[in-house]
Image: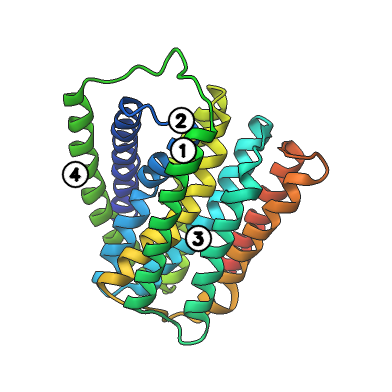
Amino acid sequence: MNLLFIVLGLALLIVGGNWLLKSAVGFSLRLNIPKIVIGMTVVSFATSAPELIVSLKSALNGYADLALGNVIGSNIANLGLVLGITVIISTITVQKSFYKTDWPVMMIASLLLYFFIIYDGEIQKFEGLTLFLLLIVFLIYLLRFQKTAVVDEMPDDDIELPLYKNVFFLAIGALALWGGSELLIEGAVLMAVDLGVGERIIGITIVSVGTSIPELAASVIAVIKKEKAISLGNLIGSNVFNILAVLGITSMITPIKVGDQALLTNDIYWMLGFAILVFPLVFFPSKLKLGKLEGFILLGLYIFFIYQTIN
């Protein structure tokens, strides 16, 4: 029954995230926002919605390790699993904004999270506010400078939806995310109890991979449709949103206190390691490209991370 709750919860999160994504991109197209900005903001926020809902409800219900493990695990999965699979499927040409803006902001967010939790094992309300304010600054920068810097044409198959459809997808997407989070958290906690493992293990494996499925789907579809700017922007942006928005908003509402010390002695370093590793991979062996070799490196490391986590 626990596994059924998890599967149904993940299914609703995936469907809800997809509906929310349709609505978000639909509204963005109405505003004529360039795709790279859509990828770094609207798509990232929509695909991070499952993490936000799951982490917020987990923290409010007293499952802090599940909330934090979900975000840290999702950030690892985004770069190891999702980016790895994406570039194995198709080589991505990386834009200069990666090392000028996107990667530095991701590293700043990751390091801020590290320093906030490494000393006292807690993300307090004022620290959450700091994370969220940094997100606002980042979004203002993107919309003011990258909107005019990127020249992009809308592809033939991107059709602007009627306003009522955008609102409809937004409503049912939000409802599905809420229902999916209820089922997923209930199933995950009960499974952890039945298996005798901590919330952190379940959060950083099953839950984090499940809530990263929207990123995987969005990225694979993006490379298949040749919309690779959205693909890479989505992943980097999603990691930024996971820390600044998901943990920022959650800890502003209720402080997140670490229970399982492995989050501080192991998992947070894996998250930082993957974030750092992406930078040299973008330049070596091929400059500003990520292909099959880099994909297999990332995917291999992710598989090793999961193996050492559950053993």
Q: Residues within 10 Å of mark 4 (few under 14, many from 20)?
A: some
Which corner quadrant of the image does residue 41 belong to?
Answer: top left
Image coordinates of residue 52 in percent, x first then y, are: 33, 56
Q: Residues within 10 Å of mark 1 (few under 14, many from 20)?
A: many
Q: Earlier in the sequence, mark 3 or mark 1?
A: 1
Residue situated in front as seen by the camera: 214 or 303: 214
Q: Earlier in the sequence, mark 3 or mark 4?
A: 3
Q: Would you say the residues marked 1 and 2 are in contact, meaning their CB atoms lie under 8 Å apart?
A: yes
Mark 4 — residue? 175
Mark 2 or mark 3, whichever is nearer to me: 2
Mark 3 — residue? 73
Q: Residue furthest bottom?
A: 120
Q: Secondary structure at mark 3?
A: helix
Q: Secondary structure at mark 2?
A: loop
Q: Amino acid at mark 4?
A: Leu
Image coordinates of residue 227 in percent, x first then y, are: 54, 26
Q: Which mark is residue 37?
A: 1
Q: Looking at the rendering, in which quadrant would you find the N terminus?
A: bottom left
Q: Secondary structure at mark 1?
A: helix
Image coordinates of residue 217 in percent, x first then y, are: 46, 35
Q: Amino acid at mark 1?
A: Val
Q: Secondary structure at mark 4?
A: helix
Between marks 3 and 1, how big is the CA–CA gap? 25 Å
- Residue at x 57%, y 67% (from the top left corner): 309
Q: Would you say the residues marked 1 and 4 are in contact, meaning their CB atoms lie under 8 Å apart?
A: no
Mark 2 — residue? 34
Q: Is residue 119 above or below residue 153?
A: below
Q: Residues within 10 Å of mark 3 (few under 14, many from 20)?
A: many
Q: Amino acid at mark 3?
A: Gly
Q: Would you say the residues marked 3 and 1 are in contact, meaning their CB atoms lie under 8 Å apart?
A: no
Between marks 2 and 3, how big is the CA–CA gap? 30 Å
Image coordinates of residue 42 in percent, x first then y, are: 38, 40
